[in-house]
């Protein structure tokens, strides 16, 4: 698992890589963007002598079949579907409750993925109830074949009204959180958004991107407000809108009621962590973008305290800052 720059999650976990959707030839970050790890480093595979060898021409390693990787291999068969069984234990090593994006370098629920790969991933999800696992697919039909644990968020990608059927299928999936990833936004979204609990909105990047029209964005913002659906706008779409919203399902913060597996290095008892979470939850509230400018005046001591608390109980740094701002404003209003 890796810490990630993806704004709406904490970690990425890739027990499977590879994809056969047509977007891999159009705008897929992993296959098209020069800065992606796949294009920067290519395939890394173990040769007949047991040594790891790199191959920048990763496409030459593809066969169109499914593969099982050995420990130490990365994209050993390019972007062919590949299972990494040695990565299944990674979520257990993170004891801090976190949001985990499952397979950001492929589609775990693609028609080509063997059922046994998916079942092994879901088994880990069940055994790590302290984490929230975020799934995303372009093939939501396959969600209906599985039973998702309560710590699962299931999403599907939609780019315009042409993908409305995916959204309707997603609404049938029994899961605590069903979400739409409208990234990239390539056209108008006019279909009914009710029935989902979260929406991510982003723009296309790279060469000759489709520029999202302001009325497309405004319509989504208006509908999410009307339906009370949390909206998370990515940085790459902020230049195309006069409104910027970032919310998560629930109260805009990831809080787990489950105690993570005991850690030998843990200095805080489960009871103290639970009390700290309860205290923070009691202060939690969103603040608008204008108020957020107060962050510029945060003293360094407060920033250090925020980082320390984040590391101890696993709350996003941005959420902690918002909570602190809320509490600061409350105290100023009440003369505390």
Image (cartoon, grey):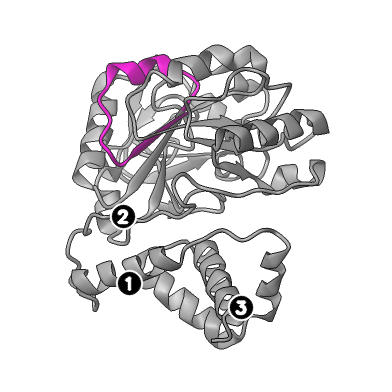
Q: Give the label, 3 or 1, closer to the camera.
A: 3
Under circle 1, the secondary element is helix
Res. 201 visible in picture: yes
Q: Which residue is mark 2?
A: 256
Residue contact at pointers 3 and 1, CB within 8 angstroms = no
Q: Residue at horizontal 49%, vertical 30%?
A: 78
Q: Quadrant of residue 215?
A: top right
Quote the CA–CA distance across marks 3 and 1: 24 Å
Labelled pair 2, 1 in contact (Cβ < 8 Å): no
Is disc 2 surrounded by few (<14), some (14 to 19) or many (20+) residues within 10 Å? many
For the record, the magenta segment spans 137-155
- Judging depth in this view, the residue of 71 and 7 nearest the camera is 7
Could you classify mark 3 by the number of other residues whose Cα lies within 10 Å: few (under 14), some (14-19), or many (20 or more)? few
Task: Examine the rendered structure and indicate whether residue 311 appears above or below residue 230.
Answer: below
Circle 1 residue:
276
Q: Secondary structure at mark 3?
A: helix
Left or right of residue 294, residue 145 in this image: left
The answer to the question of whether label 2 and label 3 lie on touching residues, with beta carbons closer than 8 A, is no
Q: In this rendering, would 168 be left or right of 173?
A: right
Query: Label 3: which residue?
Result: 333
- Residue at (42% x, 70% y) in the render: 310
Marks 2 and 3, how far apart at CA: 31 Å
Earlier in the chain: of badge 2 and badge 3, it is 2
> Of residues 316 and 205, which is closer to you in this image?
316
Which dot marks residue 296? none
Report the quarter where the C terminus lies.
bottom right
Nearest to N terminus: mark 2 or mark 1: 2
Where residue 28 appears, x then y in whole percent?
62, 30
Residue 29 appears in view: no
Q: Please report the residue visible at 21 percent of the width from the left and 59 percent of the height from the top.
A: 259
Q: Quadrant of residue 114?
A: top left
Tell which tag, 2 or 3, sits nearer the viewer. Answer: 3
């Amino acid at each position: 698992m890796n810490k990630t720059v993806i704004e709406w999650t904490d970690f990425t976990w890739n027990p499977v890589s590879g994809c056969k959707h047509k977007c891999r030839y159009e705008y897929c970050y992993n296959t098209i963007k020069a800065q992606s790890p796949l294009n920067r480093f290519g395939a890394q595979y173990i040769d007949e002598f047991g040594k790891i060898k790199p191959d920048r021409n990763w496409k030459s390693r593809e066969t169109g079949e499914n593969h099982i990787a050995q420990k130490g291999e990365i994209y050993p068969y390019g972007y062919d579907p590949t299972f990494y069984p040695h990565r299944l234990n990674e979520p257990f090593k993170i004891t801090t409750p976190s949001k985990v994006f499952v397979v950001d370098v492929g589609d775990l629920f693609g028609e080509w993925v063997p059922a046994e790969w998916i079942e092994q991933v879901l088994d880990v999800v069940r055994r790590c109830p302290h984490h929230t696992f975020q799934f995303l697919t372009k093939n939501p039909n396959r969600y209906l074949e599985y039973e998702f644990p309560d710590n699962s968020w299931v999403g599907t990608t939609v780019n315009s009204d042409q993908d409305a059927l995916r959204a309707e299928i997603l609404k049938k999936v029994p899961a605590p959180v069903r979400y739409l990833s409208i990234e990239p936004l390539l056209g108008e979204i006019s279909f009914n958004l009710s029935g989902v609990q979260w929406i991510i909105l982003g723009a296309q990047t790279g060469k000759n991107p489709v520029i999202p029209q302001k009325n497309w964005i405004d319509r989504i913002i208006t509908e999410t407000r009307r339906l009370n659906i949390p909206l998370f706008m990515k940085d790459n779409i902020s230049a195309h809108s006069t409104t910027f919203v970032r919310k998560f399902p629930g109260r805009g913060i990831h809080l787990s009621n489950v105690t993570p597996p005991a850690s030998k290095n843990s200095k805080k008892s489960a009871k103290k962590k639970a009390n700290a979470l309860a205290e923070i939850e009691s202060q939690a509230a969103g603040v608008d973008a204008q108020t957020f400018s107060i962050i510029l005046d945060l003293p360094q001591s407060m920033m250090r305290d925020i980082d320390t608390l984040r590391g101890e109980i696993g709350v996003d740094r941005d959420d902690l800052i918002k909570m602190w701002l809320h509490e600061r404003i409350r105290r100023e209003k009440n003369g505390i």
